[in-house]
Image: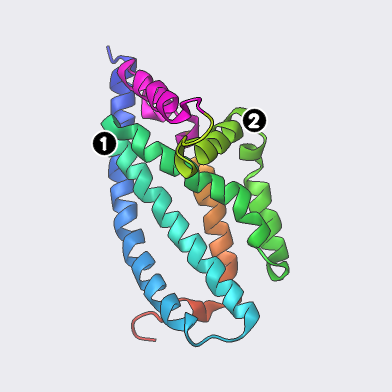
Amino acid sequence: MIGADDVAADELARRVDALRVDLERTRADYEQIMVHLAGLSSTVTDQEKRKALELLATVVATDYEVKVLLLREFSDPNDREVWEKYLALISWAVVEELPPRIGSEYREAGRAFKEALKPLKSDADYMNDLTEIRNRVVAHRDLDGGDHWLAQWHLAAIANKHNGRSVLQSRIIAHTGTILGALRTLGTAIRDRHPDLLPPRPGH
């Protein structure tokens, strides 16, 4: 009979394998696009196009960072509290900081992006976790206030780890698929409007 631990381990192994394959492909695209955008940033003067360039760079970099941290979380769960708090920081930036940066020229894409993130915004516990981790664990690192939030957060994460709680049970991990899907949709909208922001394909 297969136990719950065996099922979780099998699912984790499957996700690690899938993420490794996806990340290899993503890494090549990520590096080429970033090199291309860095070159364009010194020549593009049109303000609308510059905003599109900056937005695309944010989308591409964020997509890559989320996948890297996910892979680390799945393949090295002994250090899950390290990877997860930075994944929470990036997730917070996607949910709270990115939507206002989507300009009026992407009104439909911006609406679709916000719609895609609604399940996250409506999860009060998740949003509270992101805000607390961003404000008190990562950004300010508990240097003020005297409540030892950094230590308490790590203590809870370490307890979960030693109590056998799978990384797959993390609310932060569970919502990353939604974040990646929203980023992909937004990136496609930018690409469709400004195809020259992407590096030329071989043979073109």
**Element class at badge 2:** helix
Asked if marks 2 and 1 touch (Cβ < 8 Å), the reply is: no
In this rendered view, identify the residue nearer to me: 70 or 80: 80
Q: Which mark is residue 124?
A: 2
The residue located at (54%, 85%) in the rendering is 44
Point out residue 111 in the picture as x, y percentages from the top left corner.
71, 56
The span picked out in magenta is: 146-173
Q: Mark 2: which amino acid?
A: Ala
- Which circle's residue, 2 or 1, is located before the other in the chain? 1
Point out residue 77 in the picture as x, y percentages from the top left corner.
29, 32
Point out residue 179 in the picture as x, y percentages from the top left corner.
53, 47
In the visual, does 71 lie left or right of 85? left
Which class describes the residues within 10 Å of circle 2: few (<14), some (14-19), or many (20+)? few
Quadrant into which the C terminus falls: bottom left
**Vertical arrangement, residue 170 with respect to residue 114, above or below:** above
Residues at marks 2 and 1, CA–CA distance in whole angstroms: 28 Å
**Vertical arrangement, residue 186 with respect to residue 159, above or below:** below
**Vertical arrangement, residue 172 with respect to residue 180, above or below:** above
Point out residue 83 in the picture as x, y percentages from the top left corner.
36, 40
**Element class at badge 1:** loop
Residue 14 in view, yes or no: no
Question: Would you identify the image quadrant in which residue 5 lies?
Answer: top left
Q: Mark 1 — residue?
A: 76
The residue located at (34%, 81%) in the rendering is 202
Q: Mark 1: which amino acid?
A: Asp
Q: What secondary structure predominates along the stretch shown in magenta?
A: helix
